[in-house]
Image: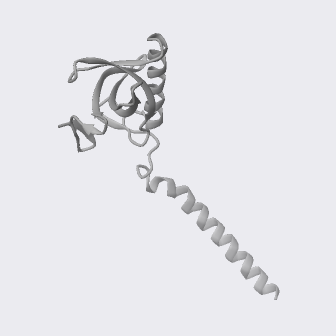
């Protein structure tokens, strides 16, 4: 019986030592499988937060609406932010990203805007805002080529 207890203790120690060695190596096995940050160090959460902050500041400055000029319709849009699509961080080139955001007009029309931001020394700055969809109808599409999104 004593021998069985000693054998059990030795096996337990050997398993503990073996698993410690494996645990130390495991983080190196999949360094890119679940990255927290995209190339350039920007996360989708950081991009969404920057867009929300930009829209909030602009809305406050412009009397309660986020205003954008719709090039196709040739008119200014008074918009209220519904949501930022936080499910995707899309890179269009190194240091330049975009995310879609849904907005609504006072009369109930829905607009999906693509908001482009660039990393600068001062932080993220908006470089372009385009109307991607009006009431669900896309004005252009996107294709991904080697991790970079391009308008088509």
Asked if residue 41 lies left or right of residue 95, the reply is right
Q: Which of the 4 image quadrants contains residue 40?
A: top left
Asked if residue 71 lies left or right of residue 100, the reply is left
State whether residue 94 is above or below residue 55: below
- List x then y, in percent, for residue 34: 45, 50
- Is the image coloured rainbow, by chain, by secondary structure, or in one colour? one colour
- List x then y, in percent, for residue 90: 33, 37
Relative to the observer, which residue lies in front, 39 or 139? 139
Q: Which of the 4 image quadrants contains residue 29?
A: bottom left
The residue lying at 76 percent from left, 80 percent from top is: 6
Relative to the observer, which residue lies in front, 24 or 128? 128
The residue lying at 39 percent from left, 32 percent from top is: 101
State whether residue 29 is above or below residue 102: below
- List x then y, in percent, for residue 136: 30, 39
Asked if residue 36 lies left or right of residue 136, the reply is right
The quadrant in which the N terminus is found is bottom right
- List x then y, in percent, for residue 77: 33, 20
């Amino acid at each position: 019986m004593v021998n069985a207890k000693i054998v059990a203790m030795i096996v337990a120690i050997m398993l503990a030592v073996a698993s410690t060695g494996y645990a130390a190596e495991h983080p190196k096995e999949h360094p890119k499988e679940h990255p927290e940050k995209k190339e350039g160090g920007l996360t989708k959460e950081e991009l969404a937060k920057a867009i929300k902050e930009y829209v909030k500041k602009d809305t406050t400055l412009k009397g309660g609406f986020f205003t954008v000029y719709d090039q196709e319709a040739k008119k200014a849009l008074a918009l209220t932010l519904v949501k930022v699509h936080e499910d995707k961080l899309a890179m269009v080139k190194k240091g330049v990203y975009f995310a879609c955001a849904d907005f609504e007009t006072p009369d109930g029309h829905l607009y999906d805007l693509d908001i482009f931001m660039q990393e600068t020394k001062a932080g993220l700055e908006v470089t372009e805002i385009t109307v991607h969809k009006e009431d669900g109808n896309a004005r252009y599409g996107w294709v991904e080529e080697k991790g970079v999104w391009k308008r088509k």
